[in-house]
Amino acid sequence: MHKTIIIITKPNFHGYHTPLGYLYVASVLRKYGNQVEVWDFNKNRLNLDKFKQKIAENKQIRTFIFGTSFTFHLNCPSPTIDEPLLLAKIIKSVDKCSNIIFIGPLNVLIAKELLQYPQVDYVVRGEPEYNTLELIRKLVRGERDFENVKAISFRGKDKIIETEQNPFVDLNKLAFPARDLIDMEKYIVNSYFSPRTASMCTSRCCPFQCSFCFDALNSQKNEPNFGKAYRFIKADGVIEEIKLLVKKYKVQGIRFEEVEFCIDKERVKVLCERIIKEGLSYLKWRVITRITSVDLELLKIMKRAGCVSIYYGIETGDENLLKRCNKKITLEEIKELFRITKKEGIEPEASFLLGLPGETKESIERTLTFANQLSPKFAVFHLFNPLPGIPLLKNKTGFGIDTIRKFNLYSSVFEPPDCNLNGKDLSNYVRRAYIKFYFKPKFIFSLFSFFVKPWFWRSAWGLFSSQTEINSMFKVSIGYKKTIFRNHLTES
């Protein structure tokens, strides 16, 4: 019987997220009768010799799916390019008849380059659930009319063929992610707001057009698909998935991982009312959103429904840079929203980007000062390593696969465009930002509140030894130099 194996590998960053993008693909394939397995080499160590032996012993496996990024539906997909290419090469050396498919949002930028590698047979562009399903159906049947599969790329007789756009996926018709195909215990974390926290994604895309964002409405990311970009799962579906997580995995907290949870205020209100009605408001949860999507009324009902933290994308403390980012907010609006968020008993977090176009030493100093004025629960300081395809760089050349494979939020991999500081200077500023924000008496004193929680000591080592954002911030703050391609593969 034809078997499809989805292989997950370690990303450059964000490896603590649940790989929901892969698991949605797995659930669709399984729903329509395909035999599917997931091999997770993000959380499980990979031995190349044993991998090669496993391929040789399983001749019924004919299709392997790799991803070029770990996360699919965030605004900064973390590349996973080198290891999949290596493993695909090993597979082809053992079984030349195997089909190799690459999926992921970065493929819109690098599809043709991926197909220069002989071990890559097909590249799926855009949202991958149903075009991957249709492609595998044809492979199982032995059909070769791949031109009829939407939003894929493959080698023709004398050129690379890229098929037409695919509709955006109807999220309310998707089965839940196939979490049972991975070891979920490795992705349930003891977060700062709750033990046993799991991830969910209840919407996709963003209707805004921030110039730096890969998930912006006018980003190249969305070109393989057509229709309404921003979509969400209705309250019934969200509640059912929450109940499944509670019943099957004993979850006590939820991280809603979509890039913009609060765009549709009415949708959030309806969902919060259902959470309260269903008796689920004891769960603690965290969302990501932008300043303009939240108001006092919304904060009140979110708090009642169990929301304890909101991660706001602030980006900069410089008014001119905010305008260049097309954020359509002001520093005063940010301050006021942080004030009312705290007043309602919700902890605000803040994300900043250093190295934006037009950045100077002075603007960075304003950002660092602004971060301390806001005094969020946590702050992250990322480097602006722009992905090609964002509105700022859309259709610009010179950013090929060799650049994209290095993309990282925590270390500079190339000189930022239109910035008055070089990569080394920016890396030093990121380190200084973490030290200035975290190594101060107020923050250190706040950590003592964790020490009395029984789960803290059980999870402390796991938090700092695993690939988490806290781990990345800690390493940056002490000057740790992280290699881009982690050599976690063992030869024996």
Image (spheres, rainbow, N blue to C red):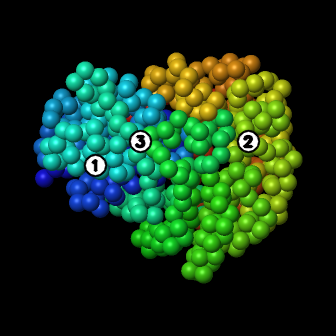
> Which residue is rendered at x = 33% and y = 57% of the image?
28
> Which residue is rendered at x = 75% and y = 32% of the image?
324
In the picture, the disc for residue 327 is: 2
- Crowd rating for badge 2 (residues with CA inside 10 Å; few <14, some 14–19, many 20+): many
For the residues marked 2 and 3, what is the alpha-carbon distance in whole angstroms? 29 Å
State left or right for residue 304 relative to residue 240: right
| Residue that numbered label 1 is attached to | 134
State left or right for residue 485 relative to residue 490: right
- Crowd rating for badge 1 (residues with CA inside 10 Å; few <14, some 14–19, many 20+): some
Whether residue 489 is visible, yes or no, is no
| Residue that numbered label 3 is attached to | 165
Q: Position of residue 17 (x, y in %)?
A: 50, 50
State left or right for residue 483 relative to residue 302: left
For the residues marked 1 and 2, what is the alpha-carbon distance in whole angstroms? 38 Å
> Which residue is rendered at x = 65% and y = 56% of the image?
263
Whether residue 263 is visible, yes or no, is yes
Q: Is mark 1 on a helix, strand or loop?
A: helix
Q: Where is residue 266 in the image (x, y as percent from the top left)?
A: 66, 67
State left or right for residue 412 relative to residue 465: right
